[in-house]
Amino acid sequence: MKIRQSSQNDLQGLLKVERQAFGEHEGQEIVELVTNLFNDSTARPYLSLVAVEKGIILGHVLFTNATITGHESLLSVILAPLSIDPDRQKKGIGGKLIGEGFKLLSAIRTDLVFVLGHPTYYPRFGFLPAGDFGLTAPYPIAVQNADAWMVKELRPGILGRIRGRVNCAAALNRPEYWRE
């Protein structure tokens, strides 16, 4: 299996994985979100990676531009979505996509990565509850899901020194995307 940056030629394959990974209804919403993010200038720069084996896309991860109110000079991204072919889940593909993303993002001096995701999955990659550091999501997160809004520090020494609201790309700036 190879992890690489996606190209325009990968679009149909990665959208197929999104649809399969999230099921019929939610999958169509994620396909729409990914398509809109690819066409959204406020999402740039973005990093889109695919896991490929024998020419078949098995997984996709997308990191899009984000800013923090009052700290706009920091380079931040939001990880959304991470999708793995259902037949290949629980085989480490998601972790490899995330790890390669961190490596490439670190190389371009990205400071922070945010995610709204499963609070038992993402901590294994170093994500911590963002609210604990005074970093709020673009839309309020329900109290019972507060631990799902997380941050990963790629450049040490930032967390605890800054506070503020995280601003996302226009395509992601809809309340329905911020319910966990």
Image (cartoon, grey):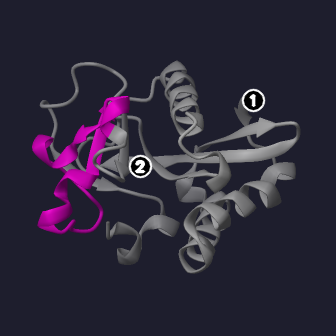
Answer left or right for 19 relative to 30: right
Residue occupying the point 36% across, 45% down: 114
First in sequence: mark 2 or mark 1?
Answer: 1
Q: Which mark is residue 66?
A: 2
Residues at circles 2 and 1 in contact by the CB criterion of under 8 Å: no
Residue nearer the viewer, 2 or 163:
2
Q: Which residue is depicted at the point 11% across and 43% down?
A: 132
Could you tell me the amino acid type at mark 2?
A: Ala
Per the rendered image, the range of residues in magenta is 123-152
Q: Is the residue marked by circle 2 packed among few (<14), some (14-19), or many (20+) residues within 10 Å?
A: many
Q: Provide the secondary structure element on which disc 2 rests.
A: strand
Residue type highlighted by circle 1:
Met
* Count of numbered circles in the view: 2
Q: Residue at x 44, y 29 (%)?
A: 110
Mark sitting on residue 15 = none
Q: Is residue 3 left or right of residue 25?
A: right
Q: CA distance from mark 2 to mark 1?
A: 30 Å
The disc at residue 1 is: 1
x and y percent of residue 145 in the render? 20, 62
Say if 156 sits above or below 52 in the image: above
Say which quarter of the image contains residue 71.
Answer: top left
Question: In x, y percent, where is residue 93?
Answer: 60, 36
Above or below, 137 relative to 53: below
54 falls in the magenta region: no
- Residue 30 drawn above or below residue 69: below
Residue 52 lies left or right of residue 144; in this view the side is right
